[in-house]
Amino acid sequence: MKSKTHILKLLRVVLACAFFAGITLLLSGMTEWAHRYLAWMAKLQFLPAVLSVVGGFTVLSLLVVILILGVILLFGRIYCSVICPLGVMQDLFSWWGNRRWQRKISRRFGKNKWQYEKGHTGLRISIFIIFVVLLVLWHPVASIIAPYSAYGRMVQSLLAPMQEPLGLMVLSLIMFVGIGAWAFMHGRAWCNTVCPVGTALGYVSKFALFRPFINAEKCTNCRACERNCKAQCIDLKTHTVDMTRCVDCFDCVNNCKFGALQYGRPAHVSVDAGQGGADKPDTSRRSFLAMLGALTVTGIAHAQHKTTDGGLAIIEEKKVPARSLPLKPAGSISLRHFTQLCTSCQLCVSHCPQQVLRPSADLSTLMQPEMQYDKGYCLTGCTRCADICPTGAIQHIDKGEKTTIQIGNAVWVRENCVVETDGVSCGNCARHCPTGAIIMVENDFGQLIPTIDTEKCIGCGHCEYVCPSRPFSAIYVEGHQTHRRI
């Protein structure tokens, strides 16, 4: 049994390292091939897959949700130990904190690592309910504690800090330091107290067919298993394992010298194993979780520095105009669709080749990506954000289809145009428009000024980017509430 679990632990560690490295590389956007070969890792994340299913995106997302739940019902919370990058990050910090010399440091700030602690059931469920409510009423704020999204923002803040607003970067770094320190001291405390995905999957894991269990006849109460349990879920007084918190890391099984702690299918397993060993199923909690699941589905269902002078103006940093409606990438369908499904993971931000996508600092769309054209413009042949979006907030489109989607319209501001202010000829916007939506016509003084054919404009922002006017472009793009086909 021990040799088998040793292989299971080795397999778990290898897979966890592969997923962690792959997702980190994918989120960093540092390589051109990552979005081609690693995007599937993002699509295996549980919350994005659930949101994609609720949004009616693809059958693939439904299969991912069913697969994850099926694996958990069979083997327990392996998802949290292998696929979730924030979970693996906590394991790295807890492993570091549980080494002998770090243990001396950690004892100065708390209990000896580690001891059994009763699960904070009321707190976990309360946070989960608040998360669900926020997911319905204020989606961007809910994504702050969503594990995959939180890790995505941490990677973005650490590897590409200048692409984020200062306040959001500071928030991400505080979360990185806070969660890392908490894991260093108390293992999977965040995962089993705050994380809403951990709470949901933990209660599904109560019904797992295969699980760690203690053979009381062989147990000598040496506490080797308890000291090595980063989830602090092994209760030696009752010889039970709290399956709502166990993440199936197999550390305890491998550290038991007497074979008392085993992994498999116990002879008699009740749904309350790990909750005091009671034989009577906890039907009230089962009903409560069913109610929360219905609430979730029902609620959600309703629910920087590049400048161009053009040879005409002094080089000066361009400022972002105040748009009445934010710009979202082609494939987003509408502002409502995008806001409801986006988890602010920053995956599209890190992979945007033109640095057009940025995290929003607006409270209504906090940390969700929006498009700005001061550093670049949206390439008509680029569909990278649509290809890698794991939730369907940006639906997949082909390159030819993108040129037929109107995400906004260009607007000319006479007071800013160098033709009007400096009396010189320009025409940059018309020359660079990929759809021919801008043509030059004579004004009353015989000078050529731009006019915009709103039926042809797709809102790519090329004109706004190349406009030589500073600090604000004389031509900019206003977003559409719902994208249109032209």
Image (tube, rainbow, N blue to C red):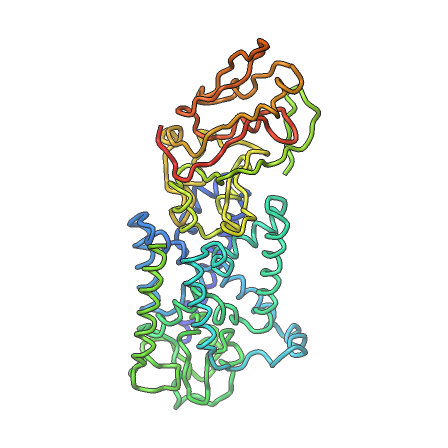
Residue 329 drawn at (x, y percent)? 45, 38
Q: Is residue 265 above or below residue 162?
A: below
Q: On the rendered image, what quadrant is the C terminus found in? A: top left
> Residue 57 at x, y = what percent?
32, 47
Picture quarter containing residue 177? bottom right
Residue 71 versus residue 264 in the image, above or below = above
Which residue is at the front of the view, 327 or 172? 327
In the rendered image, the residue lying farthest to the right is 314
Q: Is residue 155 above or below residue 204?
A: above
Towards the viewer: 440 or 83: 440
Count of numbered marks: 0
Q: Residue at x 60, y 68 (%)?
A: 96
> Residue 282 lies in what quarter of the image?
bottom left
**Location of the N terminus (image quadrant):** bottom left
Residue 198 on image: x %, y %: 44, 67
Residue 287 visible in this rendered orientation of the protein: yes
Q: Is residue 11 visible?
A: no
Residue 107 image position (x, y, % from top left):
65, 79
For the view shown, which residue lies furthest in the front direction?
Answer: 444
Q: Residue at x 54, y 21 (%)?
A: 429
